[in-house]
């Protein structure tokens, strides 16, 4: 079901900046993944420290700062589900994040795509309901094309 109404001039009753504050020195780039094993492995292999916490209804989410090749990067284990992911991201944007990198795993229906291939999406089907609060209604939404150019050339 597509929500056909969208008004970007309206402000919500409760906004992330009403309950969160910017964090001085918060990393501008944040990476997240959905796989707990991958998340834990990265924490085991890279120096890190907890810099913040946020939460969804029943789960607290620690946010770490990693140092990689001299760069400070935010890192957290994403909650599965669009609404929870967005709630976490809204908080992290207030903290100071400017860029987000998400990685995970997926299955494919196209047998020409080999196992362990890297897939960079160009668009997504909007069937979750959450994104309709942030962008005009449509059945599909494109990703940031500048990012695709950087990754794929």
Image: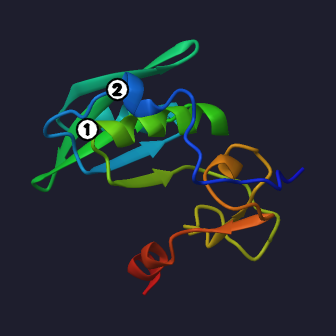
Residue at the spot 29% in from the left edge and 36% down from the top edge: 95
- Regarding residue 77, the answer to whether it shows in the image is no
The image position of residue 79, as x and y in percent, is: 56, 31
Left or right, residue 83 beside residue 32: right
Residue lying at 75% horizontally and 56% vertically, measured from the top left? 126
Residue situated in front as seen by the camera: 117 or 79: 79
What is the x, y in percent for residue 70? 9, 54
Nearest-to-viewer mark from 1 and 2: 2
Looking at the image, residue 152 lies above or below residue 15: below
Q: Secondary structure at mark 2?
A: loop
Looking at the rendered structure, the secondary structure element under dot 1 is helix
Task: Give the residue drawn at x 52%, y 15%.
Answer: 59
Residue farthest to the right, as pictured: 1
The numbered mark at residue 20 is 2
Identify the mark nearer the N-term, 1 or 2. Answer: 2
Q: Position of residue 71 (x, y in %)?
A: 15, 53
Q: Which residue is mark 1?
A: 45
Q: Residue at the spot x=59%, y=46% of the render?
A: 10
Q: Residues within 10 Å of mark 2 (few under 14, many from 20)?
A: some
Does residue 62 lie above or below 107 as drawn? above
Crowding near pointer 1: few (<14 within 10 Å), some, many (20+)?
A: few
Say which of 39 and 145 sits in front: 145
In the rendered view, would you say 3 is above or below 55?
A: below
């Amino acid at each position: 079901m597509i929500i056909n109404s969208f008004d970007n001039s309206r402000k919500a009753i409760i906004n992330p900046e009403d309950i969160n504050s910017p964090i001085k020195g918060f990393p501008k780039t944040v990476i997240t993944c959905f796989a707990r094993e991958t998340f834990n492995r990265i924490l085991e292999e890279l120096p890190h420290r907890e810099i913040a916490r946020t939460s969804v209804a029943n789960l607290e989410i620690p946010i770490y700062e990693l140092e990689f090749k001299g760069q400070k990067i935010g890192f957290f284990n994403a909650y599965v589900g669009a609404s929870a992911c967005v709630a976490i991201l809204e908080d992290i944007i207030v903290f100071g994040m400017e860029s987000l990198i998400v990685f995970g795993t997926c299955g494919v229906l196209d047998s020409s795509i080999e196992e362990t291939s890297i897939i960079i999406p160009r668009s997504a089907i909007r069937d979750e309901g959450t994104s309709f609060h942030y962008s005009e209604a449509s059945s599909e939404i494109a990703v940031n094309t500048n990012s695709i150019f950087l990754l794929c050339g």
